[in-house]
Image: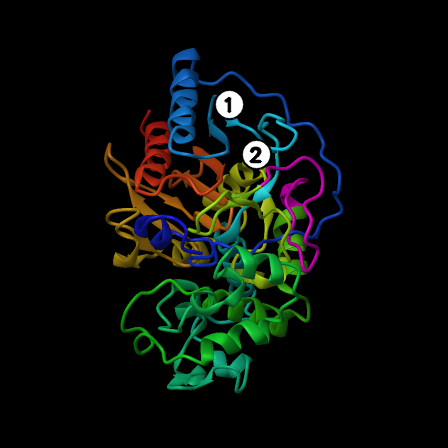
Amino acid sequence: MKTKTTSRVLATTLVTALAGVGLTLPAAATTGSAPEPAVKPAHGTSHSRTLQADVDAIMKTGSVGVVARSTGPRGSRTATGGVADTVTGEAARPGDKFRIASASKTFVATVALQLVGEGRLSLDDTVEHWLPGVVSGHGNDGGAITVRQLLQHTSGLFDYTRDFPVLSGKTAYEAGRYTTWTPEQLVGIGMKHAPNFAPGEGWSYSNTNYILAGMIIEKATGHTWQQEVTARVIRPLGLRHTLAPTTDSRMPGRHLHGYSGFGEPGDPIDVTEFNPSAAGAAGAMISTTADLSRFYQALLGGRLLRPAELTAMRTTVRAPELDPGWAGARYGLGLMEIPLSCGGSYYSHGGDIPGYTTRDGVSADGRRTVVLNATGDGSTDSSTQQTQNTLIDNELCT
């Protein structure tokens, strides 16, 4: 959904234009909201003040609520700002759940690469091999697109969220927010359009790629992508507040409410409840800053993938479409690589969905992570994106 600036929209790594489709159905057994683990002291009060100051800066750009967590070898620090719910006035808390949108893609890519490591899938398999006839028409050819190109956004396929009626405004959102969509229907929207380029001949962010990846996971395993993510990632890592929902529009337990005006005049609306089938494997998940930190630490630390598959995930290509939000961005298999101001780079996968913005950063060895979520539309210029980037850069460069 394009209620932000151009840079914000291009940055929508979650559901690029899908700034309007949610997630919400517990895939794990957890439905309550257990207390956040005690926060260990980290690098001293001055660094804690810096994190809080950066959260305050994000709040000043128009966010409703912000939660942030910075984790390193010496422990974790959290900072919050604003409210979780504008009706009750409850303050945002470190353990509040939120919709992570396109950050879901890293979970899905991880499962796909685990299947590659098990010999049940190949990155060079074609889409046609797994999903005969699904990618066809208007110049689309599933026989010419590989699994690697889906995960890397080099397939050329049109992003279905750019022609998704639910995201066209407040009225359309409220009318369609509870509609259940099948993956085939979402891919079908993309197939009504010609590809952006021939497979492998460019880079363009497309949520259609990951809807297809979720379908391939189901074909290869006999289980939905939600079931595989839960069994292979959520449960083994003990991510008690992370959900891979199917059609439940609610978020269980304590959570941040999302708000969006969809770029229209008047007050924003509460967009918290949303049928996550509209986002599917491209962005349906729910989590917390603590759980996302644990996931990215485990992933980059080598606990979820074998060396060959982790290397494949971290092998990136230039993604110039993302430059307005992240100058010099590169993209691997479900992971972005972003330059640091202090030299080197970090890995990331943000997500945007109406009402929610997730940003994160993790060092190459997985020892340091930063995760934040901001609710509301933020600024009408690039200041919200810039302040979010600054927070992550400051934490990883400290």
Which residue in the protein does label 1 denote? Answer: 75
State which quarter of the image contains the C terminus. Answer: top left
**Magenta segment:** 236-257
Left or right of 111? Residue 379 is left
Residue sitting nearer the eye, 311 or 142: 142
Q: Position of residue 115 (x, y in %)?
A: 56, 64
Q: Kindly report the secondary structure that dominates the magenta region of the rendered protein.
A: loop
Residue 254 magenta-highlighted: yes
Q: Amino acid at mark 2?
A: Ala
Queried whether the magenta region covers residue 7, the answer comes back as no
Q: Nearer the viewer, residue 371 or 249?
A: 249
Three-letter code for the amino acid on which mark 1 is drawn: Gly
Kindly state the secondary structure of the residue where label 1 is placed. Answer: strand
Split into 4 quadrants, where in the image is the N terminus? bottom left
- Residue 278 on image: x %, y %: 58, 63
Against 35, is 289 above or below? below
Mark 1 surroundings: few (<14), some (14-19) or many (≥20) residues within 10 A:
few
Q: Which residue is mark 2?
A: 290
> x%, y% of residue 383?
31, 37
Q: Is residue 277 left or right of residue 320?
A: right
265 in relation to 96, above or below: below
Q: Give the CA distance from mark 2 to mark 1.
A: 12 Å
Element carrying mark 2: helix
- The colour scheme is rainbow
